[in-house]
Image (cartoon, rainbow, N blue to C red):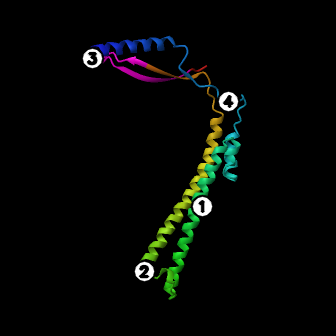
Amino acid sequence: MQKRTLILLWLLCGAVQFVIGQEETAPLLISKDSIKNDDINPLSPAKAAFYSAILPGLGQAYNKKYWKIPLVYGALATTIYFYTRNNDFYHEFRGVYKDRLAGISNPRYDYLDDDRLIEAQRFYKRNRDLSLLLTVGFYVLNIIDANVDAHLGQFNVNDNLSIRQDLYLDQRYMKPNFGVALNYKFK
């Protein structure tokens, strides 16, 4: 039974190799040209980055990637929200601690001792700083995304770039092996 399966697999792999071998001139998958016109604008990535630096999301609109604009504003709005929230809590606990040192009692926070108030200040200050760092990070990521997207919009993909999948038998173990070949033809 095992011999029969091995022979069947051998014949199947041989047939697949024969079929793939016949298609040497026509690869299985050819990417089409992504350039809409032959004009390449070298300043397009700089414009997109500049627009995104002026107003977040404007570079994505320049690149006609409108679906990214809500993501940009969602990320920035979320981090700004957490920045303001943590900043408010930081100042609230700082004010309560300063009032307690001055001898003014706040009945809302009487259950917390001084160490807890100091720890709360540190916690909200750390989270506020992290939120600010994330806000700046998303702002910079917005600029980089617009620039890279504008670069890739001009990327030339033509018939010289192809991908082909191969199935062949390993001569030592008589087992099928799979492979992918990436070919590029220089003119």
Tell me the element at label 2: loop
Disc 3/disc 4 C-alpha distance (Å): 53 Å
Q: Tell me where residue 121 appears, x and y as whole percent.
A: 49, 72
Q: Tell me where residue 159 appears, x and y as whole percent.
A: 61, 21
- Mark 3 is surrounded, within 10 Å at the Cα level, by few (under 14), some (14 to 19) or many (20 or more) other residues, namely few
Name the kind of residue labelled 3 in the image: Gln
Residues at circles 4 and 1 in contact by the CB criterion of under 8 Å: no
Tell me the element at label 1: helix
Helix, strand or loop for the magenta stretch, by majority: strand
Q: In the rendered structure, does residue 95 fall within the stretch colored magenta?
A: no
Dot placed on the residue nearer the N-terminal end, 1 or 2:
1
Q: Which label number is shown at residue 148?
A: none
Name the kind of residue labelled 2 in the image: Asp
Q: Which residue is mark 3?
A: 2
Image point (70%, 30%), residue name: 36
Dot placed on the residue nearer the N-terminal end, 2 or 3:
3
In the rendered view, would you say 158 is above or below 15?
below
Of tags 3 and 1, which is closer to the observer?
Answer: 3
Q: Quadrant of residue 18?
A: top left
Query: Which residues, given as a range, are shown in magenta?
Result: 167-184
Of tags 2 and 4, which is closer to the observer?
Answer: 2
Q: Which residue is mark 2?
A: 113
Q: Which label number is shown at residue 80?
A: 1
In the rendered view, would you say 103 is above or below 40?
below
Tell me the element at label 3: helix
In the rendered view, would you say 53 is above or below 94?
above
Figure quadrant of the N terminus: top left
Tell me the element at label 4: loop
Q: Which label number is shown at residue 35?
A: 4
Disc 3/disc 1 C-alpha distance (Å): 65 Å
Dot placed on the residue nearer the N-terminal end, 3 or 1:
3
- Front residue of 57/74: it is 74
